[in-house]
Image (cartoon, helix red, strand yellow):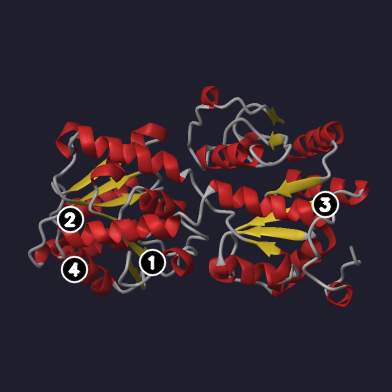
Amino acid sequence: MWVNFGPYHLARLSALRDVVDISAIEFASAQTQSGWKPQRATHSMAITTLSEGAYENQNTLNLCVAAWKAMSRIAPRVALVPGYSEGPAITAALWCLAHGATAVLMSDSTRPDWPRRRWREWLKRFLVRTLFKYALVAGKRSREYASILGVPAARAFRYYDVVDNDYFAAGTRALRLRQSAARYHLPQNYFLFVGRLIWEKNVSGLIESYAAYRKAGGHWELVLVGDGPLRTELMAAAEQCGQEATIHFKGFKNGDELLPYFAFAGCLIAPSAKDTWGLVVNEAMASGLPVLVSRNCGCSDDLVVEGENGSVFDPQDRGRLTALMAEMASCGDAERSRRGMRSLAIISEFSPSAFASEVKRILDLEAGRLPHPLSAETETEVGRQPH
């Protein structure tokens, strides 16, 4: 289940359907925060939608009641629940507790995401230990945080944050063979940013570093794909630094609209000040791009191999990012291609099929087809009953 199924979630559902018998529930038919427009017609998956309209406009109590009814109708043995902060998600986990089903926490949260208050962390630990038996996490940092909340590492399975790698790889490859950057009104050489124009994404810092790169003699341009409340402010910043002609604001793009931007970019930059993971990095790597990724992106520990497919930087160190941009632009097409191929190799491990395999492992554990990862003694220590 999820708040609103977008492209990422549909890819996971398709992979799951290949290995297990599944049902899908979304809390609402749209979500203002995401802005994506999933092409449901291309998917035959039957999805139960609890409420029409944007999730942010729904009555939480009504959604909780609808979630309980949907769970009772489907009667799952295992439920993949999106976190512990939304009412319908907690409702689904409570349904599992009341009916002897297994709730699996899906989370990419990491400890540095937000300032942590002791009472709130205590409440999270209580909820997680009481309601969830396993976790599906994104990577190293989210596994560590799940352990802090009470899910032992042996019960935390990876590959939660994945995208449809084949879609991006095949789509961008076809465009490179048949089209050109000029066909889509894109510069010949450019750095790419994809994301919402909000404070957390640190686009202002990216513009500052890029302006310094141009001042030092750099010739690549900067393409920003996305929209958000800071758009006007950021356009003013581009003009103020004299780069309004080389910084291109392309607005929000969805689905196939994104492919040309990945296809003809020289490098993706993910400069976030705060980001639990950063799925755009997955997309760029599946498109065969080298990446420059902020260390504040949760994916930086798992997806970036320094000097091989890109680099990790401190988002507050403007000079470091400027230097990395200059190095990336000057390293030559062959070297960038080599780094892009390394990205493809790394991201191949993080696929929807890998996610589905982890879910299948959980089902096999529950059915007794695999040895349990924790002894009864260890389970007792973390507040669980032996399976």
Q: Tell me the element at label 2.
A: helix
Q: Nearer the viewer, residue 189 or 227?
A: 189
Residue at horizontal 63 percent and vertical 37 percent from the top:
55
Q: Residue 294 has which mark?
A: 1
Q: Position of residue 132 (x, y in %)?
A: 79, 58
Q: Tell me the element at label 3.
A: strand
The Cα–Cα distance between marks 2 and 4, rounded to whole angstroms, is 25 Å
The answer to whether residue 19 is above or below residue 306 is above
Marks 1,3: beta carbons within 8 A: no
The Cα–Cα distance between marks 2 and 1, rounded to whole angstroms, is 25 Å
The Cα–Cα distance between marks 1 and 4, rounded to whole angstroms, is 16 Å
**Amino acid bearing label 3:** Thr
Q: Tell me the element at label 1.
A: strand
The Cα–Cα distance between marks 1 and 3, rounded to whole angstroms, is 36 Å
Mark 1 or 3, nearer chain start = 3
Q: Position of residue 344 (x, y in %)?
A: 37, 54
| Front position among marks 1 and 4 | 4
| Front position among marks 2 and 4 | 4
Seen in the image, is 295 located left or right of residue 363? Answer: left
The Cα–Cα distance between marks 3 and 4, rounded to whole angstroms, is 50 Å
Q: Position of residue 340 (x, y in %)?
A: 30, 56
Residue at horizontal 69 percent and vertical 71 percent from the top:
153
Mark 3 or 4, nearer chain start = 3
Q: Tell me the element at label 4.
A: helix
Q: Position of residue 156 (x, y in %)?
A: 68, 64
Q: Can you identify the residue that label 2 sits on?
A: 240
Residue at horizontal 64 percent and vertical 38 percent from the top:
18
Q: Can you identify the residue that label 4 sits on?
A: 327
Q: Can you identify the residue that label 3 sits on?
A: 102
**Amino acid bearing label 2:** Gln
Q: Nearer the viewer, residue 140 or 247?
A: 140
Quadrant in the picture for the N terminus: top right
